[in-house]
Amino acid sequence: MAQKWTYETLAAADKATYENILRTGTPPDLEALNGYIYCGWNHEWIGRLSGVKFKKGFYKRDGINYGYNETVMQDNQGYLGQWESGLHKVRPNQLGYFKTGYVRDQPPAKFSEPYRHLATVDYTVPFHKWYLVFFRVIKDFVVCPNEGDNTLLLCKAYLHFSDNFNVLYCYFILGHRYEIRYLPW
């Protein structure tokens, strides 16, 4: 019987385990993500550059699956503690917009070949303010660690410059989801 992952046990796993889950797991149902925001945690130290903790919301607009990130107050409790949204005036600070899809629906590329069976988060959307255009090089691969369970996700983030030039940014976890209160726009 396969291991039943929780947010905590997944956060405590190592990179080799993450890679095995990504290469053998199943993608989430993208429609089932819509309307929810997830609490995220960056596994690697590099995540401190953008914040170890963050939130990622998913929604549908004009028939297309999109999403966004929200900043979170960092509490130095790792994958434990709270995910209190950073505010911009009275709303959460939302940035880093993306489109979701399945890798199999995109043109084949050497870069994504090991993950053709997964979902993807692609930041090459026109919603970024000029000073946040760097988001456009981020590409994530997304898997359900527990098959068919869309409440816990494992992701692998790359800085994608071309099919031959990609830099692993980090692995991250999304879980503790709840309904979105403030949609973008």
Image (spheres, helix red, strand yellow):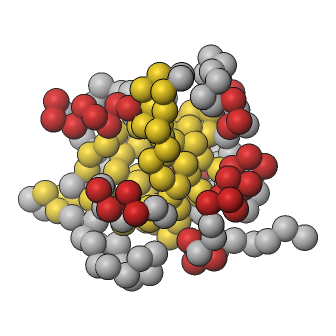
Image coordinates for residue 91, horizontal then vertical, percent: 18, 58
Vertical side of 120 occupied by 51: above or below = below
Residue 75 placement (x, y as % from top left): 29, 78
Residue at position x 47%, y 22% from top? 162
Residue at figure coordinates x 49%, y 33% from the top left: 166
Which residue is at the far right?
A: 1
- Between residue 12 and residue 107, name the one nearer to us: 12
Please state the horizontal and vertical placement of residue 97, each as a whole percent of the image.
34, 39
**Left or right placement of residue 182 versus residue 44 in this view:** left
Q: Is residue 128 visible?
A: no
Q: How many marks?
A: 0
Above/below status of 133 relative to 17: above
Corner quadrant of residue 50: bottom left
Quarter in which the N terminus is drawn: bottom right
Pick the residue in front: 179 or 95: 95
Residue found at the very far top of the displayed protein: 107
- Quadrant where the C terminus sits is top left
Q: Is residue 73 left or right of residue 53?
A: left
Residue 93, image x, y percentages: 21, 55
Q: Is residue 140 above or below residue 150?
A: above
Along the horizontal axis of the image, is 69 left or right of 117? left
Residue at image coords 28%, 65%:
72
Query: In the rendered image of this protein, does residue 118 appear above or below residue 1?
Result: above
Question: Does the image show residue 160?
Answer: yes
